[in-house]
């Protein structure tokens, strides 16, 4: 047979055939997620022409300003996926409580957690945004799914992925057997396998962090960044480069393509929030993807995927990317916690800054 490109649907069917008792449910579920991402890609791509730029005039459960496209994308995810009959309930950044599929006849065996539009502060400036999703099994026998049924550690995810709406739209997916990237062919509306088996190099000389939060960072993070910025003449003996897009999806995508380190660490800005990113629909799916690509994903003090969730919108520190750098930062956390990293654990360190030596 002549060689031709593999579509996302064909890829999922092929993956499913590896499991002799597979029912085909997953193929169906992913078809709807794929359709939701295509729809969002279309409205994001129309920009101001679609009248969907700007703020919605509302706030979500976390008190964040919602953009019109946050609300619209959430709606698209809900409506598209509800129809498929594979999901019992869906949880999202934009909804206080899970949405339970209204028609009990249509309720399926899976739970979907998603961030419908990540990086939404970038919409109006025409910078890449994305959607992130995580699929869990609805516990056996549960017919009325609620928040507590979603609170499973990331190790329980059956599938995770994201779509990035950039110069091209890509869907990147893991079913627990590596990470595979598909590019949307706008000509005939299908995702085509263009990046099979994406791998994150173990080493990197590029990091991403919002340095405007520096004064709130913990000593191990200050130490790590200070050493990178010191460059060739510093303890690392190498020059480092830095990026900050403010769309986690785009940062993770860059790391999958060329390596790197992404951090939104724990900080002291608001003691009620142990980090910026949300565990269930940002950190966990990205951690599964990064681990499946050979990288590491940590809170600084343990694997993100092993955190036992306590709330749907719980926040968590995130340090992910090239394995050797993540392990180095974990070591810096251990050394701080054990008081071994003078002068970084000394109160004097608080007087020092990245920019004033
Ligand atoms: P969201 O748009 O879904 O609220 O997420 C934005 C997140 C993440 O994508 C990004 O890494 C981070 O917030 C940016 O935060 P800062 O504005 O603090 O840089
Ligand atoms: Mn987000
Ligand atoms: Mn969002």
Image: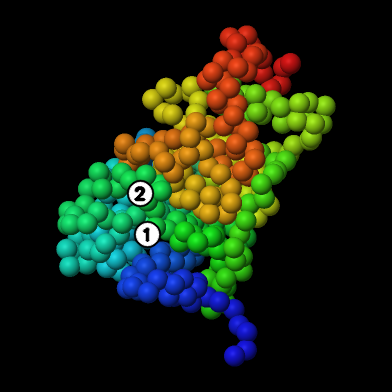
Please tell me which residue is depicted at 51% across the width and 38% down the height of the picture: 298
Q: What element carries label 1?
A: helix
Q: Which of 195 and 47 is in front in this view?
A: 195
Image coords of residue 129 (percent x, y):
53, 52
Q: Is mark 2 on a helix, strand or loop?
A: strand
Please tell me which residue is depicted at 41% across the width and 35% down the height of the picture: 315
Image coords of residue 219 (percent x, y):
58, 21
- Name the quadrant containing residue 25: bottom left
> Where 54 falls versus 187 (above or below)?
above
- Residues at discs 1 and 2 in contact (Cβ within 8 Å): yes
- Answer yes or no: is residue 20 visible: yes
Give the farthest residue toward the front: 20
Q: Which mark is residue 92?
A: 2
Earlier in the chain: of badge 1 and badge 2, it is 1
Cα separation between marks 1 and 2: 9 Å
Q: Which mark is residue 77?
A: 1
Please tell me which residue is depicted at 56% across the width and 67% down the height of the picture: 182
Q: Is 353 placed left or right of 320 in the picture?
A: right
Image coords of residue 27 (percent x, y):
39, 71
Tell me if mark 1 has few (under 14), some (14-19) or many (20+) residues whose alpha carbon lies within 10 angstroms of its own: many
- Name the quadrant containing residue 175: bottom left
């Amino acid at each position: 047979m002549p060689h031709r490109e593999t579509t996302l649907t064909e890829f999922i069917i092929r993956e499913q055939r590896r499991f002799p008792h597979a029912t085909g449910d997953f193929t169906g579920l992913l078809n709807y997620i794929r359709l939701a991402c295509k729809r969002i890609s279309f409205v994001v791509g129309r920009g101001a022409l679609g009248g969907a730029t700007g703020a919605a005039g509302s706030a979500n459960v976390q008190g964040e300003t919602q953009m019109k496209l946050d609300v619209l994308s959430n709606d698209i995810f809900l409506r598209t996926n509800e129809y498929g009959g594979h999901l019992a309930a869906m949880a999202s950044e934009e909804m206080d409580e899970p949405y339970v599929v209204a028609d009990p006849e249509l309720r399926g065996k899976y739970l979907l957690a998603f961030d419908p539009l990540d990086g939404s502060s970038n919409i109006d400036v025409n910078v890449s945004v994305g959607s992130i999703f995580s699929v869990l099994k609805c516990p056996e026998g549960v017919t009325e799914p609620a928040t507590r049924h979603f609170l499973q550690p990331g190790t329980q995810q059956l599938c995770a992925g994201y779509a990035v709406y950039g110069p091209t739209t890509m869907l990147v997916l893991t079913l627990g057997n590596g990470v595979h990237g598909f590019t949307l062919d706008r000509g005939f509306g299908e995702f085509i396998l263009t990046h099979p088996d994406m791998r994150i190099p173990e080493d990197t000389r590029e990091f991403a962090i919002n340095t405007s939060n520096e004064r709130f960072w913990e000593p191990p993070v200050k130490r790590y960044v200070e050493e990178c910025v010191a460059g060739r003449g510093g303890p690392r003996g190498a020059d480092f480069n830095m990026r900050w897009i403010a769309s986690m999806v785009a940062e993770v995508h860059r790391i999958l393509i060329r390596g790197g380190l992404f951090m939104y660490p724990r900080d002291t800005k608001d003691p009620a929030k142990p980090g910026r990113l949300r565990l269930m629909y940002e950190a966990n799916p990205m951690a599964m993807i990064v681990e499946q690509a050979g990288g590491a994903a940590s809170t600084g003090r343990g694997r993100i995927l092993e955190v036992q969730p306590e709330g749907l919108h719980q926040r968590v520190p995130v340090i992910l990317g090239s394995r050797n750098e993540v392990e180095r930062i974990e070591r810096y956390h251990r050394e701080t916690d054990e008081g071994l990293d003078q002068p970084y654990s000394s109160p004097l360190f608080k007087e020092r800054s990245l920019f004033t030596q």
